[in-house]
Every structure is written in C-alpha cells, then in structure tokens.
Amino acid sequence: MSTSENKAPIFPKGDKASADYFTGTVWIRLLLPNDDIMHTQIGNVVFEPGARNNWHTHPGGQILIATDGVGYYQEKGKPIQVLHKGDVVRILPDVVHWHGASPDSEFTHIAINSNTQNGVVTWLDRVTDEEYLSLGK
Amino acid sequence: MSTSENKAPIFPKGDKASADYFTGTVWIRLLLPNDDIMHTQIGNVVFEPGARNNWHTHPGGQILIATDGVGYYQEKGKPIQVLHKGDVVRILPDVVHWHGASPDSEFTHIAINSNTQNGVVTWLDRVTDEEYLSLGK
C-alpha cells in the first residue's frame, strides 16, 4: 500500500500579495484565519523566483515549513540561510527578518503565526537587491 | 520557471507512535518541540491504512493540515469526515476527537498544537473497530 499518487501541489495558489510589503510576485492562500480562541493564523505562500517579503517582525513569533522549491531566510545581522523542502524555521517574537524565493527557483512555505493575541506582523523596510543578493558575499 | 521536480514526501517518516495511544502503525516526526516562548508544538504524522489515534482532547486546540492520502476525522457525537490533501481542520480546545487513515489509504498530516501553555494533549479511550467503521452507517 503506497501513498497517494496525487503529485499536484498541496494547495492551489491564492491571491497576489500586496506590492506594499512584497517585492516580485507572491501568492498567499489563507489556511486558518486568526481568531481569539486558537491565537494562530496559517497561510500558504508561493514566491516566484527572486520574490520576497519586506523586513518584518511577528510579535507572537512564526514558524515556516518549506514544502517546495528553494528559498531564502535571513535574520537582521546574520547571513542568508538557504531553505529546502522539509526545512522548518522557528522565528522568535520581534526578530527582524525576511523570507522569499531564491533567484532561480520558485519557493513554497506554510507560515504559522503563533500567539496572535500579541499581534500578527509589523512591516518594515523593503529588502534591497543588494541585501537579497548578499549570499556568499 | 516551474516548481521543484522533487516529488518525494516532504518529511521522512519519524518514530513509531506508542501503542498506548494509537491503533495500527503510525510514525511521528517532531518538527517543532514545544517551548515556553512559541507555545506551539508541530509534528508530521503518517498513518498506515486503518491506523488511528485514541479519542483525545487538546487543552489549547489543534490544527491539522492534510498533505497526502485519504484520512478520517471525527468529533464525538458527529459523523466521520473524510480528509484529502489540502484539507485543514480546526479543532477547538477540549473537543473530544480522533483522526487517522482511511481503511484503504495511507494518510499524512501536519499537526499543529496551539496555546500549549494550556497543555498539549489528554488521551482517552481507544477508537473501537465499530466506531472506526461507522462511516455512512
């Protein structure tokens, strides 16, 4: 008995994300709306190659689960980390960071915002091309 | 530019789950250990066909994200729901429920335990074969 032969993506692409907070084309599909009982918001995010979000923080923290493609994750003052399918990132409350696709691959992750009674997200500056292309420099 | 051609499961199977709380063979891979900052515990669970957990509750609630195969989910006093890849289940705190594979298909889900400052899980009775086979009866 084997696993399903259904090899399509787990989720269809959602709505295009706002250009105010994202560079390049990004699709977000809300999987769990925030509420006052679960204190959790979950979304599936697909980044086209080169696309990323702005620098930002989560007052209640966030967990990323990489499910397809190759992505980037960076915390302020640290080097870019390359993410592959199956990688899990634990982002502590108020840590300034960004995430997105690598330049040559689409990237998909599930984003889990925890402790949303403390807030969901605080957006900061855009990630410049110089910052985005800093890997290995 | 397309998504990754890597069609393997997102996560390798983890450790076999305890027969005290599960019927049939189940593998659990911990993705995020619980801690006092994130208040969140995440695991990937693979159920062989026919396998399921006992009736149980989560004091802080739980979200299931179905990622492969065909599964079952049931809340006490309600009919069994059939789960497919991409389905998301919001389980409120203290709701008595169980989940597992359908009889003829393996099933994989990500399980996200929220608000773990209130507790993670309280195990109850085993799901009997009569209960497990009650779909459509």
Image (spheres, coloured by chain):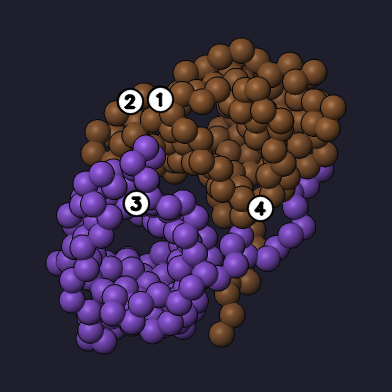
Chain colours: A purple, B brown
Q: Which mark is residue B59?
A: 1
Disc 1 and disc 4 on one polypeptide chain: yes
Residue designated by label 3:
A113
What distance separates the C-alpha of mark 3 from that of mark 4? 22 Å
Query: Could you say whether the residue bearing mark 4 is in a helix, strand or loop?
Result: loop
Residue designated by label 4:
B85
Mark 2 and mark 1 in contact? Answer it, CB < 8 Å: yes
Give the mark nearest the N terminus, 2 or 4.
4
Type of residue at label 3?
Answer: Asn
Type of residue at label 1?
Answer: Pro
Crowd tier of the residue under label 1, counting other residues whose Cα lies within 10 Å: few below 14, some 14–19, many 20 or above = many
What distance separates the C-alpha of mark 1 from that of mark 4? 26 Å
> Can you give x and y, in whole percent of width and height, for residue B6 in the image?
61, 66
What distance separates the C-alpha of mark 2 from that of mark 1? 6 Å
Q: Chain of mark 1?
A: B
Residue designated by label 2:
B118
